[in-house]
Image: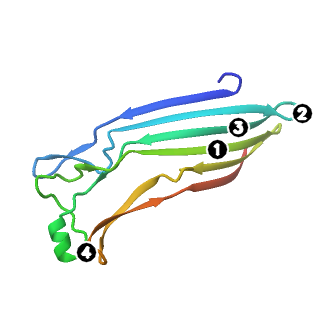
Amino acid sequence: MDKGLYFLLTGSFFDAKYKAADGVERNTRFNRNYVFNFLIGKEWRVGANKNNLINTNIRLNYLAGNRIENIDLGKSLTQKEVVYGENDGNLAFSQQLPDSPIVSFSFSYTKNKPKHSSVWSLQVVNALGTEEYQKDFFNIKTMNMDTKYTRILVPNISYRVDF
C-alpha cells in the first residue's frame, strides 16, 4: 500500500481432466484452463483523529468459459427435448463457452472505536451485467435448439462489527 493506494494481480492456469471407465481422458465441466484477477483500490483516513477509513475498489475477474455438454441434435429434434451425449467424435465437455469478464466494485466506511470497529459496505458483483450461460432448451415455436443466458447483478449492503 502506498498513500492508501493498493492493487493485486493474480492468475491461474490449470487443466482439469478425468479418465472415464472407457479409459479416455476428458475435460471436466469446470476446466476453464485460466482465470485472471485484477483489483485496484484506494483508502482514505478520515475523522477528527484520522482513525476512520473510507475505502473504494474495483475488481476485474477474467474467466475463461465453462465447459458444456455436447447436444445430440438428431435425438433432440426427434424427442423434442435436449438430449446430451457424445456424438460425431465430440467428447464430453469438449465445447467451451466464451470468456467472461466480470467487473465488480465496493465502497466501505470503517469507524474505529477503542474496543471495536464497525464497517458499512456496499458491494456490487457483476456491475456491468455480463451474460452467463444458463441452459440449452428445445424451442417448440422454432422446432430447434436454443440457449438461454442470464445477467445476474448482485448488490450487497452489509454492516459488520469487529471486536
At 15% from the left and 58% from the top, the residue drawn is: 86
Marks 4 & 1, CB-CB < 8 Å contact: no
- Mark nearer the N terminus (2 vs 1): 2
Hey, what amino acid is under mark 1? Answer: Ser
Measured in 3D between alpha carbons, the distance from the residue under mark 2 to the one under mark 1, in whole angstroms, is 24 Å
The residue sitting at the front extreme is 142
Indicate the position of residue 90 as horizontal and vertical percent values.
15, 52
Quarter assignment of residue 143: bottom left
SS for dot 2: loop
Q: Alpha-carbon distance for marks 2 and 3?
A: 17 Å
> Is residue 151 toward the left or the right of residue 111 in the image?
left
State the residue in front, 68 or 114.
68
Q: Are marks 3 and 1 in contact (CB under 8 Å)?
A: yes
Q: Which mark is residue 55?
A: 3
Residue count near mark 3 (Cα–Cα under 10 Å), binned few <14, some 14–19, many ≥20: some
The percent position of residue 3, horizontal first and vertical second, equals 71, 23
Q: Which residue is mark 4?
A: 143
Quadrant where the image shows the C terminus: top right
Which residue is at 22% across, 62% downward?
A: 71
Q: According to the image, label 1 marks what residue?
A: 106
